[in-house]
Amino acid sequence: MKFCIFFLSATLLTSGCTLGPNYRRPTVAVPGSYRGMISDEAAQTQLASLGDQKWWDIFQDEQLRMLIRTALTQNYDLRIAASRMLEAQAQLGIIRADQFPALGAGAGIADVRQAQSKFLPASETSTGQVNLSAAWELDFWGKYRRATEAGRANLLASEWARREVVSTLAANVASVYFQLRAVDLELEISKRTLNSRQESLRLTRVLSDGGSTSLLDVRQAEQLVFTASAEIPALEQQIEQQENFLSILLGQNPGDVPRGQTLAEQRQPPEVPPGLPASLLERRPDIRQAEARLIAANAEIGVARAAYFPQISLSGAGGFQSSALSNLFSGPAGAWSFGASLTQPIFTGGRLRSEVRLAEARQQTAVLFYQQSIQGAFRSVSDPGIPRAARTAFPIRSGRGASFPHALHGWCHGLSGSLDQRNQRLLGGAWPRAGAAQ
């Protein structure tokens, strides 16, 4: 009967109130459309977004895919983010354990011999005991429930942080890879330019020896050769720096990076749809992480306010104790104890009030950081829309399938063609004189 009363009272006490404010998402001014969007695009409801696509569907270079997979496996920033998520998960388990009673069991045996005295003879006693104890601090004010809520939010924030590292890492690897291929193309152009200028210098010297041109033309051709040769070491150094950076992203020591398709062979990047501004709040990992931190800070206010109220604890123990092991579990060997305690803080020197103010200030900081993250996200999406609006206002007369790699490749061929025309012009002016001299 007493145990029934105990569990009934515990159930009633644990169904108490929960202090602190419940979380409500702060009001954020969400624009109807992004800045720089075309009016036709703003009128359309775009359900599909590039964010729903997988990165291996966007990048068609197989070597780039392998590099991204390697980075997602070996990158230290991503591994640190995963470790922090495990840390938050373990911390949540520690916090949740405070909501449940602590049980313990013990057993012991003691053999005591009393020395002979003037009035009592020598005696020897043996005692054995087995007991089970329990202790429980009732969460009547919701202290541990709020702490568990904050722990879950921190775990969710660490998960969103890991996803942000994943998306940022894949984007950085692709960006550095394309920059590396662009520098490779520049180096190729510079080497071809150097070969053309060296050939032009040789022809200019031939013409100078034949008296068809002046020494000034020779010096100008030499200067062009020196300028072209000076660009190659700088580009090679830049290539090594890009390879070192990409190796660090891959979680490897600085070294050579394998290449795949050339820049001219890469598929034209897709036109990224801006999507809806409201969906950005649910998509971006940095915004979701900031909101999870806000939820945790909001729950910490309830933990701080619960310290104002009394702490109620229950404890009990039961077992068997006997001087003979054969009679330990029989006869009048049973023993038990039960108790309750209440602790009310009276004077703490303003500590409790300061802890509540600290929790509220942190919650306000988290609100501001959440709103700042949203504005930063709107800016990062609106910035690419400005060139799109400019292209619409001032269309470029070019092929619709043209891209930067093809344009750069065409410029390379144009430069080589102009140098070839210059050499042919020099040869065309030299051979008649040589024929006349012969």
Image (spheres, rainbow, N blue to C red):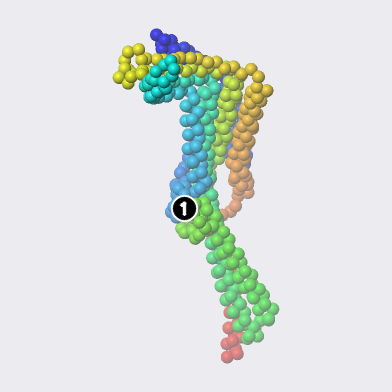
Towards the viewer: 84 or 106? 106
Which quarter shows the N terminus?
top left
Vertical order, 313 against 169 (above or below)? above
Vertical order, 432 against 185 (above or below)? below
Q: Residue 346: x and y, percent? A: 64, 17
Vertical order, 34 against 5 (above or below)? below
Tell me where residue 234 sits by quadrant: bottom right
- Mark 1: give few (<14), some (14-19) or many (20+) Cα within 10 Å: many
Which residue, as the protein is rendered here, is positioned at the far bottom?
A: 438
Towards the viewer: 243 or 184? 243
Q: Residue 112: x and y, percent? A: 40, 23
Vertical order, 241 against 428 (above or below)? above
Going 41% across and 12% down the picture, which residue do you hit? 3
Going 48% across and 27% down the picture, which residue do you hit? 96
Going 56% across and 69% down the picture, which residue do you hit? 191
Q: In this rendering, does residue 190 appear at all?
A: yes
Which residue, as the protein is rendered here, is positioned at the far top?
A: 1
Identify the residue under disc 1: 67
How many marks the image carries: the answer is 1
Q: In this rendering, does residue 39 appear at all?
A: no
Which quarter shows the C terminus?
bottom right
Which residue, as the protein is rendered here, is positioned at the far left?
A: 326
Which residue, as the protein is rendered here, is positioned at the far right?
A: 216
Residue type highlighted by circle 1:
Leu
Give the left or right position of residue 331, taking residue 249 as reference: left
Q: Residue 274: x and y, percent? A: 55, 40
Towards the viewer: 215 or 297? 297
Q: Residue 159: x and y, percent? A: 50, 37
Does dot 1 land on a helix, a strand or a loop?
A: helix
Going 49% across and 60% down the picture, which residue do you hit? 256
